[in-house]
Image: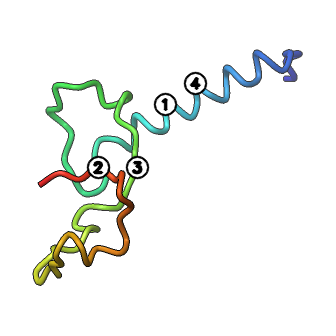
Amino acid sequence: MRLNMNKSTQRLLLSLLLLGITACAAQSKNGFDLTDSLVPTNTILSGGPAKEGIPAIDNPRFVEAGQADFLQADTWVLG
């Protein structure tokens, strides 16, 4: 059976399909169990690195403010 749909309707249906796929996949996004999530899982989007994907800074390198050649005079920093 072939349905005649305009481009807007096709895009809407594709978006709804992708949202449904995302909602199903969101039950275990990035290794987190979201079964009892207080936030609707269909609103949770994947993004950024995976779980444990950001390495710890075990040996940070510190420099004096005057030696921080990677900063500009008007760069804001939090200290």
Can you tell which of label 2 and label 3 is closer to the viewer? 2
* 70 lies left or right of 16: left
Q: CA distance from mark 2 to mark 4?
A: 42 Å
- Upstream in sequence: badge 1 or badge 2: 1
The mark found on residue 42 in the picture is none
Relative image position of residue 50 (x, y in whole percent): 32, 61
From the viewer's perspective, is residue 66 above or below residue 45? below
Relative image position of residue 39 (x, y in whole percent): 23, 26
Q: CA distance from mark 1 to mark 3?
A: 17 Å
Q: Are marks 1 and 4 in contact (CB under 8 Å)?
A: yes
Residue, x 29% and y 49% (percent of image)?
76
Can you tell which of label 1 and label 3 is closer to the viewer? 3
Q: Which residue is mark 1?
A: 20
Can you tell which of label 1 and label 2 is closer to the viewer? 2
Q: Which residue is mark 2?
A: 76
The mark found on residue 16 in the picture is 4
- Upstream in sequence: badge 2 or badge 3: 3
* 33 lies left or right of 13: left
Q: Colour scheme of this structure image? A: rainbow
- Upstream in sequence: badge 2 or badge 4: 4
